Image: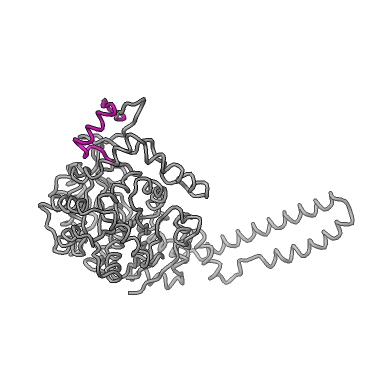
Amino acid sequence: MPSDCIPFRDTNYFSSLICDYLDRKPELQPFYNRFPTLENFGAQIEEKQKSFSIENRKVLVKALENQYKGVAITEATEQNISVLENASTFTITTGHQLNLFTGPLYFLYKIVSTINLTRVLKEKYPQQDFVPIYWMATEDHDFDEINYFNLFGKKIQWNRQDGGAVGVFDTKGLDKVFEIFSAEIGVGTNAEHLKSLFKKAYLKHTNLAEATRYIANELFGTYGLVIVDGDDQELKKLFIPYVEKELTEQISYNAVTPKANKLGDLGYKVQVNPREINLFYLAEGLRERIVEKEGRYFVNEADIEWSKSEIIKHLSEVPERFSPNVMMRPLYQEVILPNLCYIGGGGELAYWMELKDYFETVQVPFPMLLLRNSVLIQTQKQAGKIEKLNITDTELFLKQHELINRKVRKISNIDINFDPQRKHLQDQFQSMYELAEQTDVSFRNAVKAQEVKQLKGLDALEKRLLKAQKRKLSDHVQRLTAIQNELFPNQSLQERNTNFSEMYLEYGERLIPSLIDHLDPLQGEFLVLKK
């Protein structure tokens, strides 16, 4: 199966921060621990092993066994949960929201990157075991971000009342979504499998966390993926000391703010700004910020408050009600997992880079940060069209008007480049400037104005000629536009828009094994996969 790789910078879809990180710019070194090379994992293993206790491992394994009760677990996943109790076992983690039916394609790429990295590490470090982790963002509350997926350019959406952490949302109303989905994908072996997956996930499970676990387990259980729900009382108990420090010392705000400012000073966009307290309070139908005013603690938009001693006591009694926000969730992950590396998208890595000093302050090893694999999948038919249009893979990533202009100039039987005429005009005006030197400044200004006017005229004529050739070559332009729109829906990356079901309809059971075979997590380039 042919494939090609493009540097992330050349796609023009990734931030300067991520591109500079991949290039290992020296000025970014203070924002991460070790760059994710195979050799660097040796030191990361040693550092994590010293800090992660056997007691924490036992709590983690017991919590996972409880979470998997009633789930048809694969032998590979069961074995991976079991070996987490061993001091020589480490995790590679990715995380994702509970998007309806996985959301965009990159859900798959995150998990495949994670699975493949554990395989590579096992070959390099055979004395250790490595477990792929998918962290379900069950405590998030941004329902509008997860209540839909895109299918054939249409938005398949779940409409229900919002409120509280999404993991405990019941699945009522998803039978209507199932009817729409079923009608859209039609019939056939692959379509029937997708219908069955959706139906068993959302119509046979009572909440969104259970449904998402089912889907991820069905897709990746064969590869030993372990799915973690952080909304767990026993796991939260391990995090109590860090939550208490957050409440009483505002430790994340004081550590993260200077680091984020330094990123901003270097000209990078600051992804997330910390709050003074980076915790939410969870209750039925409620997930709201905890704020402190004059020594008392309040739940925003709720009639709940405590004194300092009262909230610390409440924390010890019901730690599951205290939910870390985006600034503290990375720390929570690293406290409860023997983790070496976090795999995420560009935006995720950007906010992780704000956190290194925070981790050092609370004396928790900072994980390695790896950009997930990115993929553009071309069907055989699409690849054939691209070849006929003589478009390179790199050209596909151009903005549409740039792609069209470049290809029209290339195939036109008329030279749509007035650079020789510009050169000739400028040469003519040079003699006028020499004459102007013998007169006054007003004449020189008049010559300059005339030169600018005539050069602008040439620019306008060139644009009109290009426009005329576009009309003449309209069939070619339409085919260029159509193929790019297919591969870049809404002029964005395929992986950020298209749901995996479109690909599954095309490739069926071959889809995920093919991704496993082709995605190299340490390659550091954008993959174009032609199937």
Quarter of the image for the N terminus: give it.
bottom left
In the rendered image, residue 114, in percent from the top left (x then y), is placed at 29, 61
Q: Any magenta on residue 319?
A: yes
Image quadrant holding the C terminus, namely bottom left
Q: Which image quadrant for residue 526?
A: bottom left
* Residue 60, magenta (yes or no): no
**Drawn side of residue 185 relative to residue 44, left or right:** left
> Does 486 sit left or right of 134 as displayed?
right
Any part of residue 199 in sight = no
Residue at screen point 41% across, 43% down = 255
> In the image, is 515 to the left or to the right of 493?
left
Decide if residue 110 is on the left or right side of residue 524.
left
Q: Which residues are magenta?
A: 299-323
Quarter of the image for residue 247 reads top left
Q: Nearer the viewer, residue 248 or 79?
A: 248
Q: Residue furthest bottom?
A: 1
How far across and down, in percent of the image, does residue 472 sit?
53, 65
Choose between 402 and 122: the one closer to the eye: 122
Q: Position of residue 39 (x, y in %)?
A: 37, 67
Q: Nearer the viewer, residue 518 or 471?
A: 518
Residue 227: percent from the left, percent from the top? 21, 54
| Corner quadrant of residue 34 | bottom left
Look at the image and name its color scheme.
one colour
